[in-house]
Image (tube, rainbow, N blue to C red):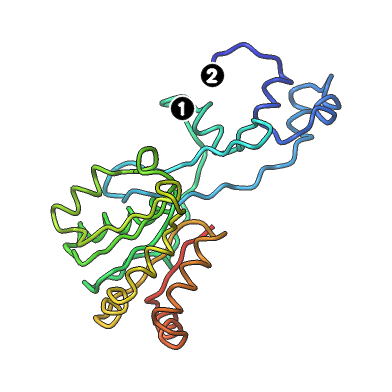
């Protein structure tokens, strides 16, 4: 990022190591340092765009730990990667989260960066001319976390989305999460499923995924949800 800093300072912003371990690296040559460091695991992000867009778009939340350190991948992407810089990556197909080829209704449920995967689904549906799509999305604050708001509103106006239900956990007196929005629309969700809708869920494994699963079980019952799962009509991309 062009700011002068020592190697120790640079590593402190990019590696999850306490000062005591950073001290051990003193005197290492650059090559020895590279050889000594363990390989980092791959970070996976849901893609928010289509190949036809001609570019790859992501929705990345910057992680900041309690001590102020940034998350390795999100910190580098949001703070250190320069515009126009090369990034080593590979695209992995998630075949279990592709949209159906037919025009059946879709109920799209997610939170946070899960909107990336749902956005790609909506874009694919719009391209195919399938407009029976319903988005239920949860985030913290409407003022700060309304990702792709103009695009979503345009899709709603154009009929690509039939409806959007938001749940803002930090707006209002009581927290409201996307699973609450799902259960609040129990009768309508049951009606959509009766009409052949598939359900796609994308976002947080912790909290959201289990909460939505519980809401759907209460709305549809275990046998119906199991039938949807076996038919490939209930799909999840949670992390």
> Percent from the top left, x then y, of residue 227?
42, 85
The residues bearing labels 1 and 2 have C-alpha atoms spaced at a distance of: 11 Å
Please tell me whether residue 7 is drawn above or below residue 145 in the rendered image. Answer: above
Q: Identify the residue shown where x is 19% and y is 54%.
A: 156
Q: Identify the residue shown where x is 28% and y is 83%.
A: 194
Residue occupying the far front of the picture: 173
Q: Identify the residue shown where x is 57% and y is 13%.
A: 3
Residue bearing mark 2: 1
Numbered disc 2: secondary structure:
loop
Is 88 on the left-hand or right-hand side of 168?
right
Please tell me whether residue 175 is drawn above or below residue 162 in the rendered image. Answer: above
Q: Residues within 10 Å of mark 1 (few under 14, many from 20)?
A: few
Q: Which mark is residue 35?
A: none
In front of the other: 160 or 57: 160
> Percent from the top left, x then y, of residue 172?
40, 48
Numbered disc 1: secondary structure:
loop
Task: Answer with the quarter of the image where residue 177 lies.
Answer: bottom left
- Closer to the chain start, of discs 1 and 2, is 2
Camera-nearest label, 1 or 2: 2
Q: Residues within 10 Å of mark 2 (few under 14, many from 20)?
A: few
> Percent from the top left, x then y, of residue 43?
57, 47
Residue occupying the far top of the picture: 4
The quadrant in which the C terminus is found is bottom right
Residue bearing mark 1: 85
> Percent from the top left, x then y, of residue 155?
19, 52
Is 193 on the left-hand or right-hand side of 86?
left
Is 111 on the left-hand or right-hand side of 122?
right
Task: Answer with the quarter of the image where residue 72 lies.
Answer: top right
Residues under numbered marks 1 and 2 in contact, where contact means CB atoms less than 8 Å apart: no
């Amino acid at each position: 990022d062009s700011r002068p800093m020592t190697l120790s300072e640079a590593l402190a912003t990019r590696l999850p190591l306490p000062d005591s371990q950073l001290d051990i690296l003193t005197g290492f040559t650059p090559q020895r340092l590279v050889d000594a460091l363990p390989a980092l695991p791959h970070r996976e992000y849901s893609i928010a765009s289509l190949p036809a867009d001609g570019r790859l778009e992501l929705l990345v939340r910057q992680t900041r730990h309690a001590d102020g350190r940034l998350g390795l991948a999100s910190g580098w992407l949001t703070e250190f990667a320069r515009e126009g810089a090369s990034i080593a990556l590979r695209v992995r197909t998630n075949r279990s989260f592709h949209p159906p080829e037919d025009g059946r209704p879709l109920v799209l449920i997610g939170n946070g960066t899960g909107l990336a995967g749902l956005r790609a689904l909506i874009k694919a549906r719009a391209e195919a001319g399938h407009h029976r799509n319903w988005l239920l999305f949860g985030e913290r604050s409407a003022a700060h976390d309304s990702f792709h708001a103009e695009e979503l509103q345009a899709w709603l106006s154009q009929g690509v989305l039939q409806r959007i239900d938001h749940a803002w956990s930090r707006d209002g007196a009581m927290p409201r999460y996307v699973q609450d929005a799902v259960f609040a629309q129990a009768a309508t969700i049951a009606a959509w499923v009766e009409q052949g809708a598939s359900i796609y869920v994308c976002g947080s494994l912790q909290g959201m995924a289990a909460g939505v699963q519980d809401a759907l079980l209460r709305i549809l019952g275990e046998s119906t949800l199991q039938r949807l799962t076996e038919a490939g009509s209930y799909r999840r991309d949670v992390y």
